[in-house]
């Protein structure tokens, strides 16, 4: 009988602890879930964010190319790129390869070829050969 009472006491105590820990566990699992969500959001902004940023640059550059007639205002164009980068959390858009690959894709989409293409590529990249290669890569790999 002593064993049975001790067992009942153990079960009661265990139940009480589980109930208390259950509440805490529930709160903890919520925190863990929130943390996992944050990590997931961070990783998607790192991998998917680059893709979204590049797509934004492509769309912006394409619209810019289509709306520009005559003289091209590169300072205004760069201001728009800076705004897009800021929105996507890119702190150094001028060194980000996705900037230039997006530009290359837009140049291809706009059907710009030959001397016009070479001129835009050189001006967008500020004559930087690495950036010009990134533009060319985007141009060559446009879906």
Image (spheres, helix red, strand yellow):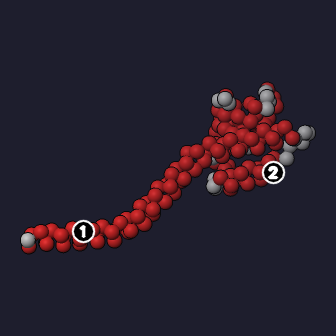
Q: Where residue 103 appears, x then y in whole percent?
A: 72, 39
> Quarter holding the N terminus?
bottom left
Residue at which label 1 appears: 14
Check residue 75 in the rendering and tell me which mark sits there, or answer none: 2
Q: Circle 2 — which element?
A: helix
Q: Circle 1 — which element?
A: helix
Please identify the quarter of the rendering in which residue 71 is found. top right
50 or 14: which is nearer to us? 14
Task: Determine crowd level at label 2: few under 14, some 14-19, many 20+ residues with C-alpha closer than 10 A.
Answer: few
Question: In this rendering, would 80 be left or right of 67?
Answer: left
Q: Can the viewer see residue 73 in this picture?
A: yes
In the orientation shown, which residue stands out farthest toward the right?
70
- Is residue 13 placed above or below 129 in the rendered structure? below
Mark 1 vs mark 2: in front: 1
Q: Where residue 39 appears, x then y in whole percent?
A: 49, 55
- Is residue 23 placed above or below 80 in the rendered structure? below
107 or 56: which is nearer to us? 56
Task: Determine crowd level at label 1: few under 14, some 14-19, many 20+ residues with C-alpha closer than 10 A.
Answer: few
Residue at 68% in and 30% down:
142
Q: Where residue 29 appears, x then y in whole percent?
A: 41, 61
Q: Can the viewer see residue 100 in this picture?
A: no
Please identify the quarter of the rendering in which residue 128 is found. top right
Residue at 54% in and 53% down:
41
């Amino acid at each position: 009988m002593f064993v049975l009472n001790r067992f009942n006491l153990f079960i009661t105590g265990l139940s009480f602890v589980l109930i208390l820990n259950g509440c805490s566990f529930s709160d903890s699992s919520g925190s863990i879930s929130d943390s996992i969500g944050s990590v997931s959001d961070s990783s998607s902004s790192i991998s998917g964010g680059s893709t979204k940023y590049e797509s934004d640059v492509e769309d912006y550059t394409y619209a810019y190319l289509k709306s520009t007639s005559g003289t091209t205002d590169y300072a205004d164009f760069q201001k728009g790129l800076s705004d897009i980068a800021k929105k996507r959390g890119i702190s150094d858009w001028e060194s980000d390869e996705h900037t230039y690959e997006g530009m290359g894709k837009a140049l291809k989409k706009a059907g710009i070829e030959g001397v016009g293409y070479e001129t835009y590529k050189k001006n967008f990249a500020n004559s930087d050969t690495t950036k010009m290669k990134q533009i060319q890569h985007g141009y060559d790999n446009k879906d």
